[in-house]
Amino acid sequence: MYERLTELGIPVVIMEPLLGGQLASLNDHLTTEMLTREPSRSVASWAFRYCGTYPNVMTVLSGMTYMENLVDNLNSFAPLKPLTPEEVSWLENEVAEEFESFPIIMCTACQYCMPCPYGLDIPGIFAHYNKCVNEGSVNREKGTKEYRKARRKFLVGYDRSIDRLRQADKCIGCGHCTPHCPQGIRIPARMREIDEYTELLRSDISPL
Ligand code: SF4
Ligand code: SF4
């Protein structure tokens, strides 16, 4: 839509520049590449600078929870260091392709699906799962060293971040949430997948 809006002389306002925070925590490989290219800038700054590089963008609305988010935003935009054509091409091709190939759930934590009548913390469950995918902590190869590490990380983090009564196994598939999700996520199906993975890890009786 950017080109069309520009043709019509309508300035662009960008919401969710970080896709609900997902572009602030990419997988380890992309994070390392970004920090190698710009050691003094955050991962999130790449998304901000991408938005700011386009001259018809009037403003970028970014949610900020902590003071460090505000500081990071200010450092990214004042002054703005526009991306080079090579950097734009790198983001649009290599980074986007790798990002899309990772099996994360495209939840932006908007909360429109909440509250779940059965008490599930839908965005919290997806956030934990995505974090583990990005960190390489989703692993089904039983018996390997990586599997043991991933299992521990997933299960310990899951219980710490989501109350047991609000985890994926409590989903009864009522479908109440699905029509509210602007990302079109098939929430009950994804809950089942996460629950199956959790059960696989929990059925392993070796100590964490
Ligand atoms: S389908 Fe599952 S997550 Fe969605 S509202 Fe029903 S119980 Fe909650
Ligand atoms: S409505 Fe969709 S995108 Fe928003 S929090 Fe729920 S699952 Fe995530």
Image (cartoon, rainbow, N blue to C red):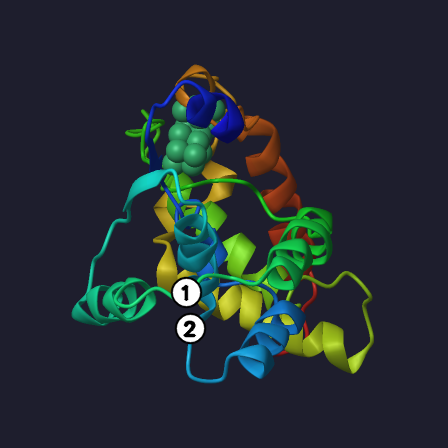
Task: Compute the Cα span from label 2 to label 1.
Answer: 5 Å
Looking at the image, residue 2 lies above or below residue 165: above
Q: Position of residue 161 (x, y in %)?
A: 37, 60
Q: Residue at x 82, y 77 (%)?
A: 144
Mark identifier at residue 171: none
As rendered, which of 27 and 200 lies closer to the eye? 27
Apparent side of residue 46 relative to residue 163 in the rendered image (left or right): right
Q: What amino acid is labelled 1 in the image?
A: Ser
Q: Alpha-carbon neighbours of circle 1 within 10 Å: few (<14), some, or many (≥20)?
A: many
Q: Quadrant of the C terminus?
A: bottom right
Viewer can see residue 208:
no
- Mark 2 and mark 1 in contact? Answer it, CB < 8 Å: yes
As rendered, which of 190 and 203 lies closer to the eye? 190
Res 19 quadrant in image: top left
Q: Position of residue 110 (x, y in %)?
A: 33, 36
Q: Position of residue 67 (x, y in %)?
A: 17, 69
Apparent side of residue 63 relative to residue 143 in the rendered image (left or right): left
Q: Which residue is mark 2?
A: 42
As rendered, which of 138 and 180 lies closer to the eye? 180
Looking at the image, residue 112 lies above or below residue 79: above
Looking at the image, residue 37 lies above or below residue 56: below
Find the residue positioned furthest to the left: 67
Q: What amino acid is labelled 2 in the image?
A: Ser
Q: Which residue is mark 1?
A: 45
Q: Alpha-carbon neighbours of circle 2 within 10 Å: few (<14), some, or many (≥20)?
A: some
Res 146 quadrant in image: bottom right
Could you tell me which secondary element the residue under label 2 belongs to?
loop
Res 55 quadrant in image: top left
Q: Residue at x 67, y 55 (%)?
A: 89
Apparent side of residue 175 relative to residue 166 in the rendered image (left or right): right
